[in-house]
Image (cartoon, rainbow, N blue to C red):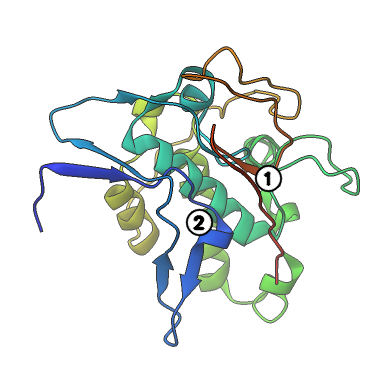
Amino acid sequence: MNSSIRIIHRDIKASNILLDSRLRAKIADFGLARSFQEDQSHISTAIAGTLGYMAPEYLAHGQLTEKVDVYGFGVLLLEIVTGRQNNRSKASEYTESLVILTWKKFQAGTVEELYDPNLMLHNHHDNNVKNDVKRAVHVGLLCTQEIPSLRPSMSKALQMLTTEEHLPRPSNPPFIDEMTMELNETCEGPCYPLNYGTSASIATIENSSFRPR
């Protein structure tokens, strides 16, 4: 269906993705969604969403485009494959975000070290599954590139996941420290320093959790 209106969800994350009885994914919770006209390149808005899933240009400048949702989708892909949340937990052996860690492992050719053991438990000898998982990581990294224009559109990301087309090499993700980042210089109106893993808007602050299977 063609439409001149674009809708940006602004809070793509695991807890906002529901599965129906046929395991088809449905996006839920459009409370933070914004719409704008097709001829607008972006809109500037107060920051709202969940740290760890927010694109750097939006987190730093409040610049909202469809590539913000693409970034969140990329983070979600990496979480599904690794069974890890995109944060720096004290209980984790790693001190970097999942996005940065995955990119470094990808560069070194050792990204398989991050795969969720439960995901690979019955599939470690299945080359088709291995290739699908590797492709999901690759697409996740393309979606989380620092430069918005380099990220694929959502339709292109889906095409990349479901076909065997050649994938370009991803450039670096944003090297930002969201654990200590303050938002008060970029919001329209009052904003508050927030802990990693919380949904944030100038009106509400909600907890967000992710538990891998």
- Which quarter of the image is occupied by the C terminus? bottom right
Seen at 83% across and 44% down, the residue is 89
Q: Secondary structure at mark 1?
A: loop
Q: Quadrant of residue 4?
A: top left
Q: Secondary structure at mark 2?
A: helix
Q: Is residue 168 above or below residue 175?
A: below
Q: Is residue 152 above or below residue 29?
A: above
> Could you tell me the amino acid type at mark 2?
Ala
Query: Which residue is labeled 2 in the image?
Result: 136
Q: How far, Cα to Cα, is label 1 from label 2?
A: 16 Å
| Other-residue count near label 2 (Cα within 10 Å), few / some / many at <14 / 14–19 / ≥20 | many
**Contact (CB < 8 A) between labels 1 and 2?**
no
Q: Position of residue 91 (x, y in %)?
A: 91, 49
Seen at 47% across and 26% down, the residue is 58
Who comes first in sequence, dot 1 or dot 2?
Answer: 1
Seen at 49% across and 31% down, the residue is 145
Query: Which residue is labeled 1 in the image?
Result: 86
Q: Position of residue 206 (x, y in %)?
A: 64, 48
Most distant residue in the bottom direction = 21
Q: Position of residue 65 (x, y in %)?
A: 33, 32
Q: Is residue 200 above or below residue 114?
A: above
> Could you tell me the amino acid type at mark 1?
Asn
